[in-house]
Amino acid sequence: MNETKSPDARDVERLFASEFGAQYTDRNRAIDPRKPAFFHDLFRRHGIRRVLECGSNLGLNLTDCVGDPEMDVWGIDIQRGAIRDAWASRAGGNFVVGSLFDLPFRDGRFDLAFTCGVLIHVPPAGIRDAIREMHRVSSRYLLCAEYHDDRDEVAVPWRGQAAALFRRNYKKLFLELFPDLVVVEEGYKGQEEGFDRITWHLFRKP
């Protein structure tokens, strides 16, 4: 494991709630249309209708899902400006300000809870709590789409922050926490497909 001192579980969350997070939002106001199409197609294929994206920012990953009248679409993010803009720009969907460590939803509220490029920013002190919360609010599926590393965890300096990005073996981590999860689909999406080199895993709860 990298020897960089890990921040407290809430430190990076406070960072993304600040001007640093607002700048992140401004850098990511456009999306390749293949990305929301991928998520929508994946969810429809598995009969997923009630969706929560944890760390949704502007809600761009949910664009195609929001446009589907059969889907109940939610996003949550710690960055207030992003949530405000998500409400202003989306033609539907529900977006709330909140913490990944304390999701304001009842147990099993959604068919699926997912992240895309979000768990990479959760420090070691909070990663298991974040995954447990995702597991708690989902009745059927979990999806993570993150930067993979065969090693358990590697801290990567990112935009002037020594420990704000962590590559991990996320599949291994999810299955260690919840051994009864079943991997139903997984893959890799590169820049030539509209993604930023992410490895994704769709898990089904028993």
Image (tube, helix red, strand yellow):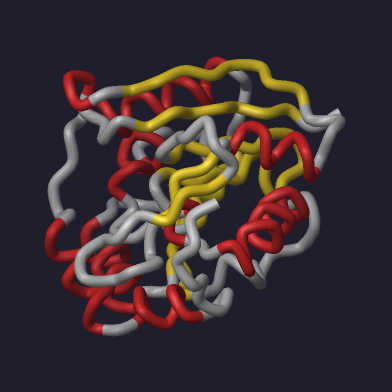
Total labels drawn: 0
Residue 24 visible here: yes
Nearer to us in this view, 58 or 47: 58
Residue 204 or 69: which is nearer the viewer?
Answer: 204
Between 91 and 78, the one nearer to me in the picture = 78
* Residue at the image position 67 percent from the left and 41 percent from the top: 173
Q: Is residue 123 above or below residue 65?
A: below
**Residue at the image position 48 percent from the left and 55 percent from the top:** 2
Q: Is residue 129 above or below residue 20?
A: above
Residue at the image point whose x is 50% and y is 76% from the top: 7
Looking at the image, residue 135 lies above or below residue 83: above
Horizontal arrangement in the rendering, residue 18 relative to residue 128 (left or right): left
Name the spot of residue 74 as percent of width and height, x first. Answer: 50, 54
- Left of 95 or right of it: where is 58? left
Residue 51 falls in which quadrant of the image?
top right
Left or right: residue 49 compared with residue 4: right
Q: Position of residue 3 (x, y in %)?
A: 49, 62
**Left or right placement of residue 108 versus residue 142 in this view:** right
Residue shown at 30% from the left, 30% from the top:
197
Whether residue 73 appears in this view of the structure is: no
